């Protein structure tokens, strides 16, 4: 396949199930239909896992890992615990 | 201690009077009727805590009558300690709600309070911004910097830990990590005085005026301003215990990092002295371990009494106990 921009030859790569073509000459990348959306989705999933802000005041050695989610725990028993001895 | 299910859903609004569903003439109905009679004014009645069938001989019962709240304390509450605590609460304006009166009803002491506006489940559902973490932290910071009056009993935190673990007795299928984690704590050994780990090792924890049982249910709005309620565990102790329950929630992964940061950040910004600014977990670690064991024990005992399996919240706390045990063994 020829690069639509510079007419260089394109090489095919498979990355995480996504099929991409890259031009050996200008390094331009060609994505098939829907692949940009797939990449964007994977990128945001990765960012959610990686970019949870660290606690400003540290955490104990025995603390559970936090994933940066906010308010996922809306179980009745958890809400009750916030209010009881 | 109340059932965790007796949460905000039970704080019925005064304009929606709750019918007391006890057998007419039964002891529960009698107690609630007598509490209502102790209110200085008439008004719509709502049972806020200890409503049948959860009522027990020893448990706390709280009834709202119009614009006052009447609270029956557990039988056997030491009267001198309670009166010292109530007296102090009356001398902390803007910080702790002052009682309107103390009465005796048979074996129980009864206190009468102005009714405040509690936090509601809607405040939580609307997102973390509606939860007054910072306001609560600032009130605790102010409490901790008040001079400690003489003759005040010890704060009730450590006694609550011991009661929560003792309440596991007789229940089957208690995850062994809870009692094992408890045994790693200095409070499990009679007469042992906890000593600070870390750089300040060997030092006694600071002694300050401590609420002793702080959680979101201990905040009410009076005239739009948040104030602390319930001096039942007020006393002298390690002020880090007042931060230890949210710390335990955070360490169990239940409380969002953002909410915890807001709470601790506001506490430090208000000049709270329970923890060091640069390394707060140095002082928080041991009390937060204690509260984790207490919360796990209470959650498991509640589930076993109700013959329910452990839910996600209880399992998170039991996991925390297992990690406490693992780090204690290192």
Image (cartoon, rainbow, N blue to C red):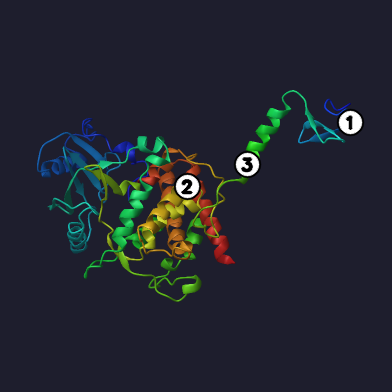
Q: Is residue B170 visible?
A: no
Vertical side of B296 occupied by B153: above or below: below
| Residue under numbered circle 1 | A8
Mark sitting on residue B22: none
Report the residue that reaches farthest toward the bottom: B202
Q: Nearer the viewer, residue B305 or B163?
A: B163
Vertical side of B5 occupied by B244: above or below: below
Q: CA distance from mark 2 to mark 1?
A: 50 Å
Residue B63 horizontal side relative to residue B160, left or right: left
Vertical side of B159 occupied by B120: above or below: above
Q: CA distance from mark 1 to mark 3?
A: 34 Å
Q: Quadrant of residue B89?
A: bottom left
Q: Is there a contact, CB below 8 Å, between mark 2 and mark 3?
A: no
Vertical side of B275 occupied by B21: above or below: above
Percent of width and height locating residue A5: 82, 27
Position of the C terminus of chain B by quadrant: bottom right
> Dot 3 surroundings within 10 Å: few (below 14), some, or many (20 or more)?
few
Percent of width and height locating residue B40: 9, 43
What chain letter is assigned to the residue under label 2?
Answer: B
> Dot 2 surroundings within 10 Å: few (below 14), some, or many (20 or more)?
some
Residues beneath discs 1 and 3 located on the same chain: yes
Q: Quadrant of residue A16?
A: top right
Q: Is there a contact, CB below 8 Å, between mark 1 and mark 3?
A: no
Percent of width and height locating residue B209: 29, 64
| Residue under numbered circle 3 | A47
| Residue under numbered circle 2 | B258
Report the residue that reaches farthest toward the top: A33
């Amino acid at each position: 396949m020829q690069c639509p921009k510079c007419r260089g030859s394109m090489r095919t790569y498979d990355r995480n199930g996504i099929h991409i073509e890259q031009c050996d000459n200008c390094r331009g990348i060609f994505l098939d239909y829907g692949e940009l959306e797939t990449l964007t989705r994977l990128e945001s999933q990765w960012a959610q896992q990686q970019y949870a802000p660290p606690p400003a005041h540290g955490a104990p050695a025995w603390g559970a890992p936090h994933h940066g989610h906010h308010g996922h725990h809306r179980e009745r028993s958890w809400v009750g615990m916030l209010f009881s001895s | 201690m109340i059932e965790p299910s007796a949460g905000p859903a039970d704080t019925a609004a005064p304009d929606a009077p709750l019918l007391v569903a006890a057998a007419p003439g039964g002891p529960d109905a009698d107690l609630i009727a007598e509490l209502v009679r102790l209110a200085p004014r008439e008004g719509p009645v709502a049972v806020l805590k200890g409503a049948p069938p959860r009522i027990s001989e020893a448990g706390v019962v709280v009834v709202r009558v119009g614009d006052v709240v009447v609270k029956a304390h557990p039988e056997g509450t030491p009267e001198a300690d309670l009166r010292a605590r109530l007296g102090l609460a009356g001398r902390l304006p803007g910080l702790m709600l002052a009682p309107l009166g103390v009465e005796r009803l048979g074996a129980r002491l009864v206190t009468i309070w102005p009714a405040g506006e509690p936090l509601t489940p809607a405040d939580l559902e609307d997102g973390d911004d509606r939860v007054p973490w910072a306001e609560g932290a600032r009130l605790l910071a102010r409490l901790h910097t008040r001079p400690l009056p003489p003759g005040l009993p010890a704060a009730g935190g450590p006694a609550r830990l011991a009661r929560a673990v003792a309440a596991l007795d007789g229940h089957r299928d208690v995850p062994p990590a809870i009692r094992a984690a408890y045994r790693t704590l200095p409070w499990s050994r009679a007469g042992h005085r906890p000593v600070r780990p870390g750089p300040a090792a060997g030092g006694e924890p600071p002694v300050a005026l401590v609420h002793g049982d702080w959680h979101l249910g201990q905040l009410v709005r009076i005239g739009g301003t948040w104030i602390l309620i319930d001096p039942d565990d007020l006393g002298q102790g390690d002020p880090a215990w007042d931060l230890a329950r949210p710390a335990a929630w955070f360490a169990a992964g239940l409380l969002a990092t953002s909410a915890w940061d807001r709470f601790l950040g506001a506490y430090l910004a208000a000049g709270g002295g329970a923890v060091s600014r640069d390394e707060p977990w140095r002082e928080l670690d041991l009390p937060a371990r204690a509260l984790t064991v207490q919360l796990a024990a209470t959650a498991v005992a509640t589930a076993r009494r109700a013959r329910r399996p452990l839910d996600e919240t209880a399992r998170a706390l039991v996991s925390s106990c297992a990690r406490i045990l693992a780090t204690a063994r290192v």
